[in-house]
Amino acid sequence: MKRMEKEGPKEIADHIKKIAMDIVNEIEAGKNPRFETKLRGRGNVLFDEDLGIIKLGNKSSTRTFLNIAHARKFMQTMLIMAQTHEYLTHGKTASIREIYYELKHTVGKTGENTFEDQRESDAAIVDLEHSIDTIREKLNVHANPKGTLYGDITLIDRAHHNDTFNCLKLGRGGWSIMSRMEPNEIEIKSVNADYVLVIETSAMYERLVEEDFARKNKAILIGTGGQAARGTRRLIHRLNVEYKLPVYVFTDGDPYGWYIYSVIKQGSMALAAHSRLLACPDAKYIGMTIQDIKDYKLQNVTEKMKPMDLKRAKELMSYDWFQNKPWQEELKMAMEQKVRIEQQALANRSLEFVATEYLPTKIKNKIFLP
C-alpha cells in the first residue's frame, strides 16, 4: 500500500507562523528576540549506522537581533520566513534567484541593502530549512531542475490543472524531473514496475531507452546526468518509501561514480539535515566495478586513474559509510590497479550488451555492492 507523507504546505506554514509569533512575543515582553538554527559543517555531521544515513548532530546556533554581529543575518532570515510563508499560503513558488530579487531592496535611508548577493539569501533559506527541519522545496522554493524519468509510472501534476500522464508514453525523451517533487504537487498515481534503475550518464540512459529496457524488464529508469539533483533524489526516495520499490544505482566505475551512489543512498554532508527526505538507504550498487573489468573482459577499454582520482578514492575509504568490507576491497582494488571503467565501455561487447546481458544478469543474481 502506498505510504503518504503528512507534512504538507499548511503544516510548514503553521510552523513558520509559530516561530514568528514567538519572536513577536519576545519583542512585546521587552526581550531580545532570538532565532535558533542547527550548526552546519563537518564538525556537526555524523553517520547513523542504524538508519544508514548521514545526518546533522545536535549542535545549534542562536542569533539575537540586538547583537550587532547577528542583526543583519537575523533580518535576512525574517525576510525569507515571511516570503516563504506568503508562498505557502497563496500556492506560489519561486526559484532561489527569484526570491533573491523579490526581497532585495535598500532599507529606508540607511543605504543598506537587504541582500548584497544571492549567496546571502541562499544562506538565509538554509537557516530556515535547518530551523524547522524541512527542505526548501517544501517551502515552495526551488533551484534549477535536472534529471529524466522513463517507464510505466503515472503522475498527476496537482499544481498544474491536475495534468495526468504516463512516462512511458512521452516519447524517448521521457519526463524532465522537476526540482519540486513534493506529494502535494506531483502525485505518484500508479507504478507498474519491479524496481528503479538510477543511471549516472545521459548517454547510458538513452542507450537503455533505445533498447526498450524499461518495458522489457518492468523497470523505472531515472537518468541523473551526473550528480543527482535534489528533485531527482526526492523522487528516488519517494518511489522507495511510497511503493517499496528496490533501487539499483548504475554509475561509472570510478570514485566520482561511487560517490554519486553514496549521495543517493546515505545522503551528503552538505545536506546532512535533509537525508530523511532525500536519502535512500535501501539502494544497492549494481556497477560499474573493478571486478567487471575481468569478468567481462574489458581490460582493453579501461581508463587510467589520475592523481586526483586516487586522492578521491582514498578519501572515500576514510568515510564511515564506506567502511564495510565489500567497498573497502573495491576501493583498494581500484587504487592498486589505478584504473577506472566507464559505463560506455560495455559497448565494447556490443551496443545492446548492457541491456540484454549485463544488467539483467546482475539483477537476477543479486550481484550488488551494499
Image (cartoon, rainbow, N blue to C red):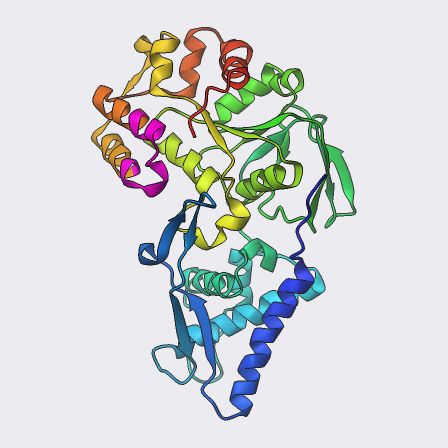
Question: Along the horizontal axis of the image, is 303 left or right of 250?
Answer: left
The x and y percentages for residue 305 are: 25, 24
> Is residue 321 visible to us here?
yes
Report x, y in % for residue 81.
55, 69
- Please state the total of marks drawn on the protein image: 0
Residue at 67% across / 19% down in the picture? Answer: 215
Magenta-tinted stretch: 316-329
In the depicted structure, whether residue 51 falls above or below residue 224:
below
- Tell me the residue at 78%/45% (across/down): 162
Residue at 37% over, 51% down: 46
Q: Residue at x 56, y 19 (%)?
A: 208
Asked whether residue 322 is drawn in magenta, I would say yes
Q: Going by the picture, which residue comes out furthest to the bottom?
A: 30
Q: Is residue 140 left or right of residue 96?
A: right
Split into 4 quadrants, where in the image is the N terminus?
top right
Work out whether residue 113 can be spotted.
no
- Of the 4 image quadrants, the one containing the C terminus is top left
Q: Residue furthest front?
A: 50
Name the spot of residue 360 as percent of width and height, x first.
55, 14
Confirm whether the magenta stretch covers residue 236: no
Q: Position of residue 356 (x, y in %)?
A: 55, 10
Please identify the dominant SS of the magenta region: helix
Q: Nearer the viewer, residue 167 or 62?
A: 62
Position above or below: 276 against 101? above
Above or below: residue 58 compared with residue 184: below
